[in-house]
């Protein structure tokens, strides 16, 4: 188990976890947000493009689900996600259906190449920038999402979204 002495946020946790997996010799590295929104069984779905050799990075997309039995993403989340997708496109040049998804998988080589600098929520968009910058083959796979009172309490508020935008702007100027 790895712990930071000081809370470094989502970005810090992902960077530390990815590096630990590389040191452990992992062939594929999964990141899975702890907000209770994802199902472990979806890991088996997102690994397929990597195993087939058609992708370097796979994102589980909550926006591609067309199953009417699945609960629809709440309006506030859809709005925040749409804004995140537009920022990803305009600032970093990559179009994606779910730039803020917390379920991702990387090949070992792609993970070793990532250069994550952000410590907070902007890491999701920074990962997309890294995909574009390194010309990684990106695949998006439909996944279900679980919306509970707990999972809805996590993620970004409007104020945090504004702070994230300015951190992304700074990140873009520095990269």
Image: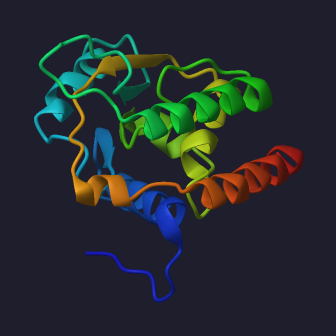
Q: In the displayed orientation, state which residue is furthest to the front.
A: 75
Above or below: residue 22 compared with residue 55: below
**How many numbered callouts?**
0
Q: Quadrant of residue 30?
A: top left
Can you say which quadrant of the picture contains the C terminus? Answer: top right
Q: In this image, 31 relative to 134: left or right?
A: left
Q: In the displayed orientation, state which residue is furthest to the bottom.
A: 5
Rendering coords of residue 10 (x, y %): 48, 61
- Camera-side residue: 66 or 122? 66
The residue at the point 39 percent across, 18 percent down is 140
Can you say which quadrant of the picture contains the N terminus? Answer: bottom left
The residue at the point 17 percent across, 31 percent down is 42
- Camera-side residue: 158 or 140? 158
Above or below: residue 75 compared with residue 32: above
**Protein image colouring:** rainbow
Q: In this image, 109 relative to 22: left or right?
A: right
Rendering coords of residue 95 (x, y %): 61, 17
- Camera-side residue: 34 or 28? 34
Q: In the displayed orientation, state which residue is furthest to the right.
A: 173
Above or below: residue 6 compared with residue 50: below
Rendering coords of residue 69 (x, y %): 12, 19
Above or below: residue 21 compared with residue 112: below
The residue at the point 49 percent across, 59 percent down is 15
Rendering coords of residue 61 (x, y %): 36, 25
């Amino acid at each position: 188990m790895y712990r930071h002495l000081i809370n470094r946020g989502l970005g810090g946790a992902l960077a530390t976890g990815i590096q630990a997996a590389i040191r452990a010799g992992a062939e594929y590295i999964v990141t899975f947000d702890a907000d209770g929104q994802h199902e472990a069984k979806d890991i088996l779905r997102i690994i397929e493009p990597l195993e087939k050799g058609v992708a370097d990075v796979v994102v589980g997309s909550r926006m591609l689900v067309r199953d009417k039995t699945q609960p629809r993403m709440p309006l506030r989340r859809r709005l925040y996600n749409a804004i995140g997708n537009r920022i990803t496109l305009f600032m970093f040049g990559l179009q994606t259906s779910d730039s803020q998804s917390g379920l991702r998988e990387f090949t070992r080589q792609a993970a070793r190449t990532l250069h994550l600098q952000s410590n907070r929520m902007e890491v999701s968009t920074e990962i997309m920038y890294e995909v574009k910058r390194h010309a990684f083959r990106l695949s998006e796979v439909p996944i279900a999402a679980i919306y509970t009172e707990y999972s809805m309490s996590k993620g970004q508020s409007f104020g945090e979204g504004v702070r994230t935008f300015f951190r992304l702007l700074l990140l873009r100027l520095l990269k």
